[in-house]
Image (spheres, rainbow, N blue to C red):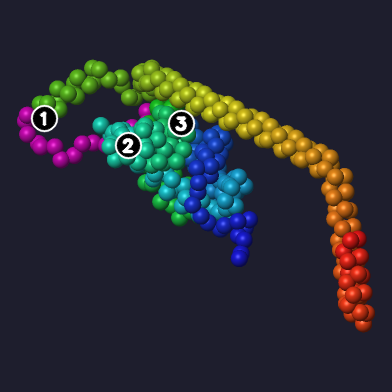
Amino acid sequence: MKITSGLPHPSGHLICMDYLTIINWLSVKSNFESCFGTSSSTSTGRPPSSKQHVFQLMAIEVNKKSRNHLNLSSSSIRDQWQTYKKKYMAAKKFKNLTGAGIMEEDERKGIKSMSEKLEIMCPCYAEMDVLFGHKPNVTPIASYDLQEKDSFNGDDDDVLLDKENNCLDSPHNLDPLLNNEDNLVPVENLQDDSQSKSIMHSTQKHNQAMTPNLNDKSGSRKRLLDMFAPTYANLLESRNKAREISDNARLEWDRERWNEEKVCNMEKQWFEEVKLQKQMEFDEKQHAKKPEFEKEKWNWECELKEKQCQMDLTIAALSSSRPIAELEQILTLINKK
């Protein structure tokens, strides 16, 4: 029978601890930015590392900490991540549905809470949601598939920042929009009638009165920056709150894990002490009974030798040609001994 439990598996299904390893690895800011870019990336920016290199680092981390002796490559860990990501998106979508909850069928299966159902749909859902569910400047994870259609040969199209909302992340990103009047595209296919011309003329006059002159670039830039300042401040506040929630959740999780490990180590130490004490008691009893056992053994050996001697004398007497009367006397004498 072959024993293969100690051999590395080139591929295989990930367990909850493997998914937790990936989430912990992505919780490191540098790793997350290498995979998905940073909140300050522009629409044309690229992370410093290629996807293949990043997923290779992720595979090394999972292989090192896996209990199943995995040996995943960069492509296989990427496939595992894609599958896990779909599970999370399905669980997230189910949670956000109106009327989502525990059904009678779930109760028959032993599912008693919404968190248990989400955990069954997506292992480590809570940890995954802490990492991706509260980031205002990150696109929904459902859009990752649209941004990951590259050839996996170094192309990085999966920047996770919303290109439309990214300009609000910093007021300075509005400058290219203000300095480039060619970006204004005229509206086509309008009906050339008197009513539409009248409406357009009145609208144009209203806009001229309410909108700053674009030729005055310094003034228009300042007004627009002032207009978007509250939005930018709200985005920063939301991002900081989300980061604080994530850090607190991670700290609480680490604290619970440390307490569980501490209790486990204490129980293990207690078990070792009890085992040592039982072994000492057993050795002590064996040592106390050893002289008595040796004495019984010696008596048994003496009795065995005596019986063997009587048998030898009986056989010798019967083999001789002595008269029967004399043999009876000899056998009687031997048995008395």
Pointer 1 residue: 197
- Describe residue 59's horizontal placement relative to residue 122 as left or right: right
Dot 1 crowding, Cα within 10 Å, few <14, some 14–19, many 20+ = few
Quarter of the rendering occupied by the C terminus: bottom right
- Circle 1: residue type: Lys
Pointer 2 residue: 107
Give SS at disc 2.
helix
On the image, the x and y values in percent for residue 25 come to 56, 39
Give SS at disc 3.
helix
Give SS at disc 1.
helix
- Looking at the rendering, the stretch of residues picked out in magenta corresponds to 176-196
Residue 191 vs 206, above or below: the answer is: below
Nearer the observer, 289 or 47:
289
Of labels 1 and 2, earlier in sequence is 2
- Circle 2: residue type: Glu
Quarter of the rendering occupied by the N terminus: bottom right
Is residue 236 visible in the rendered image? The answer is no
Residue at position x 47%, y 47% from top?
A: 81
Residue at position x 10%, y 26% from top?
A: 198
Residue 262 vs 75, above or below: the answer is: above
- Circle 3: residue type: Val
Dot 2 crowding, Cα within 10 Å, few <14, some 14–19, many 20+ = few
Pointer 3 residue: 130
Nearer the observer, 184 or 90:
90
Give the spatial CA distance, label 1 vs label 3.
53 Å
Nearer the observer, 317 or 123:
317
On the image, the x and y values in percent for residue 315 come to 88, 75
As for residue 190 lying within the magenta part, the answer is yes
Evaluate if marks 3 and 2 touch, with contact meaning CB atoms under 8 Å apart: no
Tag nearer the camera, 1 or 2 = 2
